[in-house]
Image (cartoon, helix red, strand yellow):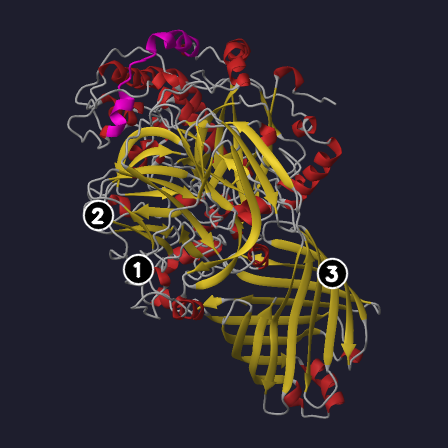
Amino acid sequence: MTRMTRRHFLRDVGLTGGAATIPWLPAWAQPVSAGIVAPLPTVSGPDIALRVAHRMMMIDGKPSHAIGINGTTPAPLIRLRQGQTARLSVTNDLDEETSIHWHGLLVPFQMDGVPGISFPGIAARSTFTYEFPVMQAGTYWYHSHSGLQEQMGHYGPIVIDPAGVDPIASDREHVVVLSDHSPMHPHRIFQKLKQQGGYFNYQKQTLAGLVSGKDQPLADRLMWGGMRMDPTDVSDVTGSTYTYLVNGHGPGDNWTALFQPRERVRLRIVNASAMTTFNVRIPGLKLTIVQADGLNVRPVAVDEFQIAVAETYDVIVEPDARAYSLVAEAWDRSGMARATLAPSAGMVAPVPALRKRPLATMKDMGMGGMGDMSGMGHDMPATSAPCPPEHAAMGHCKPAAASGDMPGMSHDGATMSHSMRDFANASELPRTPTVQTVSPMPMDRTGEPPQGLADIGQEAGYKVLVYRDLVALDRNPDLRAPSRQMRIHLTGNMERYMWAFDGVKLNEVKAPIPFRQGERVRVTLVNDTMMAHPIHLHGHFFELVTGHGDHAPRKHTINVAPGGTATFDLTADAVGDWAFHCHMLYHMHAGMMQVVTVRPAGETGAEA
Amino acid sequence: MIRAAWALTAMMTAGAVFVADPAAAQMHDMHGMHMPGMAMPATPVAKKPAAKTPARPRSHAIRKVSRAPSAAAAATKRASSPEQPAMQESHAAMPGMAMPGMAMPGMAPGMTMPSAAACPPGHAAMGHCTPSQAPGPAEAAPVGTDQPAGNAPPPAPPTTLAAARFYDPATMAAANRAMRDEHGGMRFSQILFNLAEVQVRDGRDGYRWDGEGWFGGDIHRLVVKSEGEGDFGRSIESAEVQALYAKAIDPYWNLQAGVRQDLGSGAERTYAVVGVEGLAPYWFDVEGSVFLSNRGDVLARAEAWYDQRITQRLVLQPRVELNLAAQDVPASRIGAGLSSTELGLRLRYEVAREFAPYVGLSYMHANTATARYSRARRERSVDADTGGLAVAVGIRGWF
C-alpha cells in the first residue's frame, strides 16, 4: 500500500544519492540506491568509555536530531568475551540524567542501570562506571532507561563471544539493529497519544473502504463499534511519523551487508525499537534461527519471523552470488526497514511492497476459545492429546466435556460488550478506568503465528516462526517444578492511553512483586488488552512453558499476544530489585511497569 | 451464565488433574527419548558439551542450587495436592536423565533442519510431526517446565530498596519516587475547539464557537469549557464559560462538576454544573449537563457527535445539541421546555489531526417562547429568531 502524504513527499524529494529517486514512492520503495556499507563502530576490551551526547544524524538524506554514544547512533557495538570483567565508564554529556541498561545481561542488580531501582542514575555532566563479570555469551543490546531517551537513539548492540568454541559455526557475521526514529520529540509523541487515541493510525477503517468492500463488513464494524474497539489499532505509533532504520540507516540509505557467495552468514538481529515489532524476511533465503534472546536454540528454518521490541534473534543464511533484500516490515504494515545483503557494494534486489495491514480478531480480544476452535488443535503439542491439567487450568485447552457450547458467549453484540469487561473473569483486578477490557477466555497463543502473520503462514511451504518452535539447545539449568504459581494481568485503556500490570500503574503501586531467593515460580501473563505486549524481566532468563520440558527456551523478553496468555517458569536466583515492564516504551512510560524483588528467604518481610 | 461456565471449567480442570496425568507423563517421556537416540546428522565434533552451561556461575546462583531443594521442595510438599505425586518422583528421575553426550551442539553447525526425513522424536515432542508409532515406555515422569506447579504462598513484599545498600539511601529514595512518578503519574493538557466557525445565513452572518481545555492526569482533571455565538456587527449574543473538576469514573466516562458563568448580552447568571462526558458505544462522543442558576433556574444541555471517517483524512461529523429549561428565563431569553435544538453536519479535512478546516450545515430551531424573547432584543421577525439553516465554515483544531 502506498500512501501519498505530504510528509512522505517532502521526505522523498529530499532524498539524495540515488540516481532514480521517484518522488511519489516512500523511501523504502525506492528502486535503486547505492547502499551504505558501514560496519558498526565497535568498542571492546576490559575498559570501555562511552559518552552520551546529543547529535544530528542523517536518515535518507535528511538531518534528524538524536542522542548518540561516542558520536554514533546506534551506539557502538560492544564486543565482550564470556568470562571477562567488563568495566564501562559512561559519561553523560546531556543536560538531563541518563543511564544504560544492559538488556539481557546477568549483572549484579546495582549495575543493571535502571534509575530509581538499581541505582540513582547518571546525573548530567557526570560519569558512572559500571563493572560486572560477563557470565554469558550471545547477542544482546543496551539502552537508556531514563525518560524516553531510547526513542531518540540511545541504544546499541552487545555481542559476547563464548569462552569456548561457538557451537554456531559461521564464516561471517553482521549485526542488524532495527529501530524506529521520529523527527517528533518523544515527549510530544507521548502527549499526542494521551490527547487523542489513534493519533498516529492512518490505516483506520473508512466509509470509502466499506463501500469498496475492504476490511470488515458492516455487521462486524457495528459489533466492534458497539464495543468501542478499533480492529486497526495494532501499533500506537506508526510509519506516519516513524522512519524504520537498520543500523541507523533509512530504507533509502539502504545499508548493505557484504558476503562471499556460499558463506554461512550469521545475522545478529536486535529489535531496539521504542514501539515497533517487525516481521523479518529475506525473500529468496531460508532463515535458520539459531539463537533467541542471546541463548542458543535448536536450529529451526523459517521463511519469516516476528521480532518483538527488545527481542534478539540470530539467524544463519547461506546466500548465493546475488543481492537480497532484508525486509523488516512494521507489523501494522505502515512502513518497513530495509537493508541489502550482497556480494559487492552497490548491488540491490527488488524490495517487496508492503502487505495488507492486519485487523485484530475476536481472538485478539481474548475470546480465544470461541469461534475458531480449529486453530487450537494445531497449536497444542501433539502429545498432549487429552489436555494436561495445568494447561486446562491456564485455559489452554478445554477438557472434552466443556467443548461445544459456550454458555454466556453468544456472538450477539450486546452480550459480547458486556463480557468484554466482566470482572468475574479476573476478580483480582480493580474496577477502575485503567482496566478497559478483561479477556473473557484468554488462551495460550504461543503456538500460533504472531499477529498479522496467520494468513501468510498458511501459504503452502511458507514457514513463520512461532514461539513453540523454540527449543533450548542446552538443557535448562533448573529442572525443579515450580513451588508456586501466579498470574499477572496486562491491562490497559486504549482511549485514555493508560497501561498497567494488574490494573495498577507504577505510580500507584503500593508493593513490589516479591520472590524468595532461589524459589522457582510459574508466572502466567494474561493479556487483557487488544495489543501485544513484549514483557521484559531484568536480571533473569525465564523458561517458556511451551511443552519442551527440560529444554524450554530461555528468554528475557516474551511478547504476549493480544487477548492471549504466555507462561514461564522463573528461578529467582538473582538477589536484588529488578525492573519488570512492557518494552513498548510508551506503555512503560504510561505505567506498565513494576518492581520485582528477590530476597533471601529470611528477609522477605520488612527490614530497616 | 459465564460464571457458571467458569465454575464448570474449573471443576473439569480439577478432574483432569487425575485423568490427564498419564498423558502428560507420556509426553515428557518422549523428551527423554530423543536424547540417547540423538540421530542428528553428526558434524565433526560436539564442540561444546551441552551440560556445560547449566547453572549460572553466579555466586548466589550456586548457593541457590545447594539450598533450593530444601526450601522449594518443602514448599512443594506442603502445597502439592495428593493428585501430584509424580512431581517428587520426577526429581528422583532426573539424574538418570542427564544426557551429557547430547550431540545437539554438533547439530548446530549442520543447521538445515533434518528435513522431515522421518520424524525425529525430538520434533515429535515439539509437536512438529507425529511419529508413526508411539515410542518408548509410557511411564516416565514429566521434566522441567512440563511439571505442574505447586501452590506455595508468596512471600511478603519487602519494604526496603535493595539499592540503598550500595548507594546513598536518601538519594536512592528520591530516585525511586521520581521513577515511580515518571511511569504513569504525568500530567498533560489539551485545548480543543470542535467548532470555530463563521455562519452564513439569510439574515445576518454570525459566528459560533464550542471548545474545551483540560489539564491533569489520567483520573483527575481541571476542565474549562466555553461556547458562544453572535452576529457580526453586534456585541456577543451569548457566551458562557465553565470551570469544572472532572473525574474519570469508568474506562470511557468522566463525571464533571463546577461552575458556569454566562457572559454576553443576556443576563450574567452564575450556575452550579453537574455533568458527564464520555465515549458511548458505537463511538459517539456525548456530553450532558444540568445547570442550577443563582436565581434558582434549572437548565440542561445534551450534545452528541460522531466522527464518520470517509477516508483517512476526510471526516463527516453529524452533531446534535439540545438545550432544555425547566422554566422560562426571559432575562436569558430562554423559553421553558426544549428551548433550542441544533443539528449540524460538518465535513472536515484533517491536514493534520490538530488542524482540520471544515464546511457544513447548521440548523437551529428555537421554541416559540425562546424565539419571542429573542425577537424582543433583536428586532427581527419571529422566523429569523426561531433559527434556520446556516452554512458553516470553520476550523476544528487542538493543541
- Measure how far apart labels 3 and 1 are at the Cα level: 59 Å
Q: Tell which subunit mark 3 falls on.
A: B
**SS for dot 3:** strand
In this view, A208 is above or below A352: below
Kind of residue indicated by mark 1: Ala
Residue A180 seen anywhere in this rendered image of the structure:
yes
In this view, B301 is above or below A200: below
Name the residue carrying label 3. Answer: B244
Which label is found at residue A284?
2
- Measure how far apart labels 2 and 3 are at the Cα level: 61 Å
The 10 Å Cα crowd at callout 3, few under 14, some 14 to 19, many 20 or more, is many
Label 1 or label 2, whichever lies nearer to me, is 1
The 10 Å Cα crowd at callout 1, few under 14, some 14 to 19, many 20 or more, is some
Q: Residue at x 54, y 62 (%)?
A: B284
Residue A96 is a magenta residue: no
| Disc 2 and disc 3 in contact, CB within 8 angstroms | no
Q: Tell which subunit mark 2 falls on.
A: A
Kind of residue indicated by mark 2: Gly
Name the residue carrying label 1. Answer: A34
